Image (cartoon, rainbow, N blue to C red):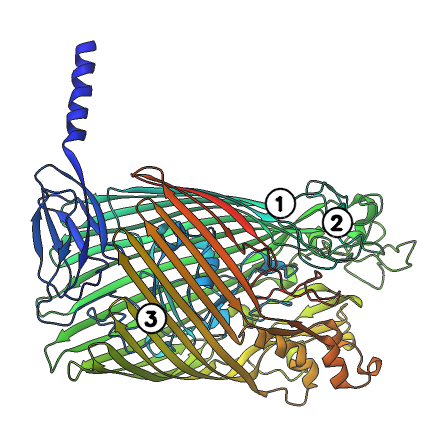
Amino acid sequence: MKKITLLFLLLNVSFLFAQKEITGVVKDNSGSGLPGVNVVEKGTQNGVSTDMDGAYKIKVKEGATLIFSYIGFSSVERVATNNVINITLKSEGGEVLQDIVIVGSRNAKRTVVNSAVPIDVINVKDITTQSGKLEINELLQYVAPSFNANKQSGSDGSDHVDPASLRGLGPDQTLVLINGKRRHQSSLINLFGTRGRGNTGTDLNAIPASSIKRIEILRDGAAAQYGSDAIAGVVNIVLNDTVDEFTGSVTYGVYNTNAKGDFPAGTANTDNNRLDLNGNGNSIGKNQSFDGGSVKVGANYGVAIGNKGGFANFTTEYINKNKTLRPGFDFRKGFGEAAIQGFNLFANMMVPVSDKTEVYAFGGRNFRDTDAYAFTRNDGARVVESIYPGGYSPRITSNILDNSIAVGFRTTTTGGWKLDFSNTNGKNLFHYYVKGTLNASLENASPTEFDAGGHSLTQNTTNLDISKNYDILEGFNVAFGSEYRTEKFTIFAGEEGSYATYDTNGKAIIDPTTQSAPIDAISGDARPGGSQGFPGYSPANTVDKTRSNVSLYSDLELDVTKAFLVSGAVRYENYSDFGSTLNGKLALRMKVNDKFNVRGSVSTGFRAPSLAQVYYNLRFTNFSASGASEVLLSPNNSPVTKAFGINKLNEERALNASLGFTANFGDFTATVDGYYIKVKDRIVLTGYFDATVFNLGVDKAQFFVNGADTKTSGLDLVFAWKKKIGSQTIGATLVGNINDMKITKVKNGTLDEQIFFGEREKAFLLASAPASKFGLNLSYERNKLNAGLAFTRFSEVTLLDYQAIEPTADYASFDDKIQQAADLYTAKITTDLTIGYKLSKSTKLSLGANNLFNIYPDQQDDWVEGGGYWDAVQMGFGGAYYYARLGFTF
């Protein structure tokens, strides 16, 4: 037995020694690294792709031959006699191809360099290994010029899903694709003082970073190519397809609790006044130097299927982030970021059926359990002293589930036509649970937790895409296809105690003429019903609505000469609930010389109103510095909405134009693109109208309306330089966005403009389009060491607080009231630092800090929307974050 074991060990050792690791860089004739080159061990299914710099690493058998292949270049074979093999591929006489992209063009030969529209290609593996940022929104916020996202607090569901946008437009005006297929949106609609107020959007954080190969961001109107939601542009997420490599990481980080500001003694979440996260009610906890402790664990592994390039790539990711608490006021003792516990599974696979046909599938499951504080109840009829002596801060928790699956096949006919047929199904489920709360009308008998119901959105999309490239002039690509999509939006009720008001006998009030709620002995007010913090959805709120749409498109690209490209697209869409629309796009690119391109486009676009915007409804308690009020968010088809003269929601219509250039001078590249976006009939959320006349048991009502026209102009720029000097590599990238949005018209009809869409609501919309953002990223690599230093400048932002809705009679004039309501956040610069060291060939340790110098926005007063000392501006209000990350590759 011992001899057999020894023989077994010797065989394994000899096998290990028979393996060797080959590294190198693949370049083109100009000396630039080529990303995406296929490097395969001849006669096997063992292969890798080069990274964004053209580098690769592969383990092969002794004496193996490597094949290097890339579209547009002659293939090269090399015997692996050395451990380092550098390759220069020669063009097959055509244009040198770099960064082939899926989004922005249906021409399989189109790249970032020769595209007629601006496209960012972001290597997620690079930025995740050199950053402590945990979520996709955070990553893109600091590397994409006009991408904006921020954490919320005191915004109910928006505390749990971060709204994100391109070029200052709404979260629902950016389309998200995965592997070129439409991703479903969240069922959440953003309310209150959040960015993206009145919008739905796609939850990018539901996609694990470990599963992503790269992200392509098309910064141009693309509704004529991809349909609704693409007014601002398109984010396409390309999933990992590597095989025979196991990669993973473990990251741990904490936030600095030393918030910068001049806070009065006794301010919540300052020394000796921190809300006890483990307590009940408003009890005080221990002082802490750090909070928001977070752990993220990710792993990715792929296996080859067959010997013709088939693969199956799998990702799992776990995240656990605790709450952060920052200085707030007595009515908002739980001000800070939500806690998140999430688990992800994702897969991407492709199986060749023949030399010209392949079947593919991808999808996954994301589950998140989130927990955020609502506004504090200190006294009055909403407090039951026997349960919470001295008051309480309810917690809005949620279970968020995203499931998705896409299945399809691609084939090439004998005539050269490429066919792609697919079906993609996705669903978002958002289920609320309110904890640390009570139903005051039940008094001492009230539970302290409630199932508050929730909402869901299901989307199913069937696509047929057909294309062919002809040798006409310098190349002519024809693409056309169709899409059929169905959507379903539901609101489901919570348990009775989460929404009902009970009478003095503990029975739900059905007849207010014979039943009455208990009276609070101290205030003399009737005790309100429903779960405090977030009232549950009642059977009266339930919704189950569907719609469908069918679309046809055609997309043509002609390289008239090697220097001149012209492309055009037209798309027809018909929705079952509001009708049809026809949109078009024209784009041009002129190559002035080998180093300089000029490009531009003009297009029309649209965005269909979401089902949530049409049918969402809720009764809630709105808290401000002047007190609490009961509000009805009335659905668009409600008689109450119609009584105020609010019309049926129609699509938003857009006109986009862009003009820019690209330049490439060896180690230095630059892109500069100006844009103009005019949107008519933007869907917005109104202010609060007096609704007491309707005897609905609420004080105010608000609605979704096609309420405003906007005009946005701006400039995106990306300057990048990278140089290898001996064993050192030095890089610098400057990304920037300059943006100017104007509200050109408010469509209030006969309604009071200041209530319909007043100065405060306008300020929220404009704050989603900050005047500028610039980021300078510096990198250094030498042998086992790498370091990164990043500076990000966030521009000045002005918001209007609750003073804007105070009676004008309390001020010298309306202008004086608006001036006093203005909260000015001056420009700030944050600094990120990371240092990494390879402990071995397979492991790397990184240490770093985001917002190294603990910079905060300017301090404000107690009129601020979220109840803390800061609004949810782009730079955030969490302060410095310190982290350590251990990465490994086998």
Residue 404, image x, y percentages: 39, 55
Nearest to N terminus: mark 3 or mark 1: 3
Residue 311, image x, y percentages: 23, 48
Distance, label 3 to label 1, CA atoms, is 39 Å
SS category of the residue bearing label 3:
strand
Circle nearer the viewer, 3 or 1:
1
Distance, label 3 to label 2, CA atoms, is 51 Å
The residue indicated by pointer 3 is 119
Q: Residue at x 26, y 48 (%)?
A: 242
Nearest to N terminus: mark 3 or mark 2: 3
SS category of the residue bearing label 2:
loop
Nearest to N terminus: mark 2 or mark 1: 1
Q: Nearer the viewer, residue 867 or 28?
A: 28
Dot 3 amino acid type? Ile
Dot 2 amino acid type? Leu
The residue indicated by pointer 1 is 290
User: Do we see residue 185 in this rendering?
Assistant: no
For this orientation, the residue located farthest to the front is 726
Residue 806 numbered tag: none
Left or right of residue 558: residue 629: right
